[in-house]
Amino acid sequence: MKMIWVKEREDNMHLIEELVKKINSNNMVILMNLSDIITSNKFQTLEELVAYEDKKFTVDKKVLTNEERIKRCMEILDSSPYEYDDLDSDQIDIYKKYRKILDDGSSSIDDKILSIIVLFSLTHRELYFPYEAYKYIIDSRI
């Protein structure tokens, strides 16, 4: 049984190895959540990560656009406001910064998606944009 697990682990390790090269204190939680998604689903390619993300954002057999995805995530954030009790003062400042970007109508789609990734991570919510999180970590944006 261990040999099978090790083999499966090796198949998707290249995705995780790329992430580990970029680990820092700002992206550690996001990177760990993303690694869990990759290993538990046995993803070996970025295309599988994209398909996983698209499945999360499929409503009535229609894949939502990025704008619709952002709107849906904002509804999630607004429907259950997060209490700051679990955050330290630095994390509260980060939360406020990214929430402001998300609420700003002139922010780019990429900035809004990045904000959602950070906000969901801070509030211990599920990672809704795993492909973008991967891309932003590799590009050192997170």
Image (cartoon, rainbow, N blue to C red):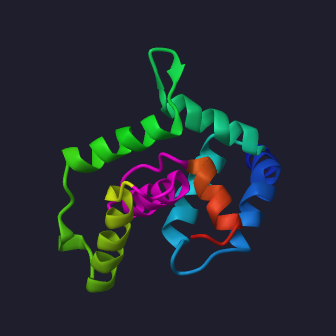
Q: Nearer the viewer, residue 10 or 75?
A: 75
Measured from the top left, where is residue 105 in percent x and y?
37, 54
Using residue 11 as the reference point, say whether residue 20 is left or right of it. left
Image height of 56 relative to 12, above or below: above
Using residue 35 as the reference point, say whether residue 1 is left or right of it. right
* Marker count (numbered): 0
Q: Nearer the viewer, residue 110 or 27?
A: 110
Measured from the top left, where is residue 81 in percent x and y?
19, 54
Q: Nearer the viewer, residue 18 or 95?
A: 95
Q: Residue at x 52, y 63 (%)?
A: 30
Dividing the picture into quarters, in which one does residue 123 lie? Answer: bottom left
Measured from the top left, where is residue 88 in percent x and y?
27, 82
Q: Residue at x 52, y 33 (%)?
A: 65
Say if the magenta span includes residue 123: yes
The extreme top residue here reads: 60
The extreme bottom residue here reads: 89
Q: Nearer the viewer, residue 7 or 16?
A: 16
Q: Please give the range of residues in magenta.
A: 106-129
Using residue 49 as the reference point, say whether residue 8 is left or right of it. right
Q: Residue at x 52, y 19 (%)?
A: 62
Say if the magenta span includes residue 107: yes
Task: Classify the position of the C terminus by image quarter.
Answer: bottom right
Image height of 61 relative to 13, above or below: above
Q: Residue at x 22, y 48 (%)?
A: 78
